[in-house]
């Protein structure tokens, strides 16, 4: 199914499969609401995360992140605590607090609605992504930590440890 980009700048409804789809670090990210729609207040992305994938431990200077897990399971580390989030759980990762997440290697993909506020961090996702020709998972690839670290200062976050 081709990626479908819908203009919601004046409001509207996005159906499943609609939005701008990107291949991000081996995962599928579909932007549902971008900063230009909300005066940079919030961005909303549907993410499908591959088993075994997740970012390194990092701290955002300016953004809060929230994940609502639609399907699957994620291991989450926040402020030195590690827990498991499952379908239906909400994960809150506040700015200024080290956090990381990962889909368990023995699990299937996880699908989450990801909110970031303010929306500026969406620019990082776009910078390390490529447009998805279809709204499907990309070919498998390793998470590129060096690329993430190289862009950290530009997008106001710091890598402070390894992935989970």
Image (spheres, helix red, strand yellow):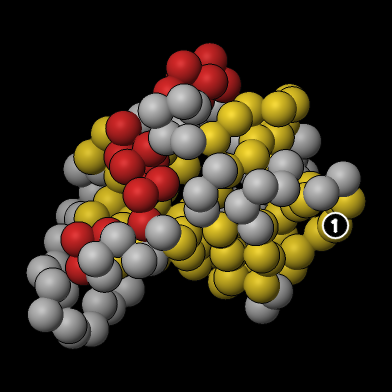
Mark 1 = which residue?
83
From where the camera sits, is residue 94 visible? yes
The percent coordinates of residue 70 (x first, y second) are 57, 71
Q: Quadrant of the C terminus?
A: top right
For numbered disc 1, what is the local secondary structure?
strand
In the rendered image of this protein, does residue 128 appear above or below residue 7? above
In percent of the image, x 71 and y 48: which residue is there? Answer: 97
Query: Image quadrant of residue 137?
Result: top left
Which corner quadrant holds the N terminus? bottom left
Residue 138 or 54: which is nearer the viewer? 54
User: Could you tell me which residue is drawn at 46 percent across and 17 percent down?
Assistant: 150
For the residue pair 160 and 24, the one nearer the viewer reads as 160
Q: Which residue is more in the foreground, 96 or 44?
A: 96
- Residue 14: where, in percent of width, then height? 25, 77
Residue lying furthest right: 81
Left or right, 91 with reference to 27: right
In the image, 41: left or right of 158? left
Locate residue 84: give its quadrant: bottom right
The quarter holding residue 160 reads: top right
User: 23 above or below 148?
Assistant: below
């Amino acid at each position: 199914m081709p990626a479908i980009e819908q203009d919601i700048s004046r409001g509207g409804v996005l159906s499943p499969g609609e939005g701008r789809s990107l291949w991000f670090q081996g995962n599928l990210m579909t932007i549902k609401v971008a900063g230009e729609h909300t005066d940079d207040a919030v961005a909303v992305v549907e993410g499908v995360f591959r088993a075994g994938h997740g970012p390194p431990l990092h701290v955002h200077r300016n953004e809060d992140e929230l994940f609502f897990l639609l399907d699957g399971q994620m291991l989450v580390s926040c402020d030195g605590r590690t827990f498991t989030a499952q379908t239906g759980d909400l994960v809150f990762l506040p700015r200024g607090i080290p956090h990381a997440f990962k889909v368990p290697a023995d699990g299937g993909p996880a699908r989450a609605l990801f909110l970031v506020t303010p929306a500026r961090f969406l620019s990082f996702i776009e910078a390390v992504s490529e447009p998805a020709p279809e709204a499907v998972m990309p070919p498998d690839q390793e998470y590129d930590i060096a690329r993430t670290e190289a862009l950290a200062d530009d997008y106001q976050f710091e890598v402070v440890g390894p992935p989970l």
